[in-house]
Amino acid sequence: MSSFIVYPAIDIRDGKCVRLQQGDYAQETIYNDSPVQVAKSWEEQGGQFIHLVDLDGAKAGHPVNDAIIGAIARNAGVPVQVGGGLRTLADVEKLLGLGVSRVIIGTAAINDHAFTEAVLAKYGDKVAIGIDARGGYVATHGWLNTSEVRAEDLAKELAAKGAETFIYTDISRDGMMQGPNIEGILSMAAASGRTVIASGGVTSLDDLLRLNVHSGSGIGGAIVGKALYTGNIKLPEALSALGQK
């Protein structure tokens, strides 16, 4: 697997593959009725790792679409990482037991430090910390709330507790096709000293190439959602341009 990974994103709501604009549940576009078929398509096009978000789980505070997630983990043929509503060790163990390769702890990373530290201690590199930021501050509960904790401070703190991978989303860029916040991603990598996966705003092949330039500075990949579904980015072409096919 390459050092810079393109993660095709599948957001699941009501059992369907959807995209939200800036995390707004009222601004939803349905792209496919079968997330399992979508995952298989990304694998067939060369995807090395698939990013799943249980949007219903993020809102409910516990996994909701675990049956679909398990089907994807069994059938995709490549590793999958999953976030959305993971608040207990039982939730984490259930998803890992379904064949998920990496779980993403988001809201709980700020609201439940004891849980987060326990998960990191037990599962290590099978855990990524999802830090979603609005104006530099951490957003929680499916982006519905904004905390008073700075994103970089949280990353630094959790890196000291054993976190190896962070997923950084600038909510203002998500679904807006405006390009990623590279400066913010690099700041997160520098603050934490760990690998950061970029999320939100990747619009074009040029965005991926600009991110890839910084792979030696801690940017370990990019999650791509809307641009793949609209055809702005074609996965095989992107992987070829990145020297991965």
Image (spheres, rainbow, N blue to C red):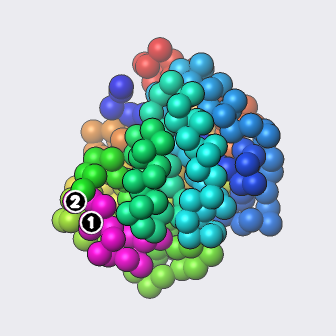
Q: State the residue in front, 94 or 46.
A: 94
Q: Is the magenta stretch mostly helix, strand or loop?
A: helix
Alpha-carbon neighbours of circle 2 within 10 Å: few (<14), some, or many (≥20)? Answer: some
Seen at 53% across and 31% down, the residue is 74
Viewer can see residue 235:
no
* Amino acid bearing label 2: Ala
Determine the secondary structure under disc 1. helix
The residue to which callout 1 is attached is 118
Q: In which quarter of the image is residue 214?
A: top left
Q: What segment is highlighted magenta in the picture?
A: 106-121
Q: Examine the rendered structure and indicate whether residue 213 appears above or below residue 118.
A: above
The residue to which callout 2 is attached is 121
* Amino acid bearing label 1: Ala
Seen at 44% across and 85% down, the residue is 148
Q: Do the residues labelled 1 and 2 touch (CB within 8 Å)?
A: yes
* Separation of residues labelled 1 and 2 (CA atoms): 5 Å
Q: State the residue in front, 79 or 3.
A: 79
Q: Is residue 93 left or right of residue 232?
A: left
Q: Examine the rendered structure and indicate whether residue 219 appears above or below residue 130.
A: above
The circle drawn on residue 80 is: none
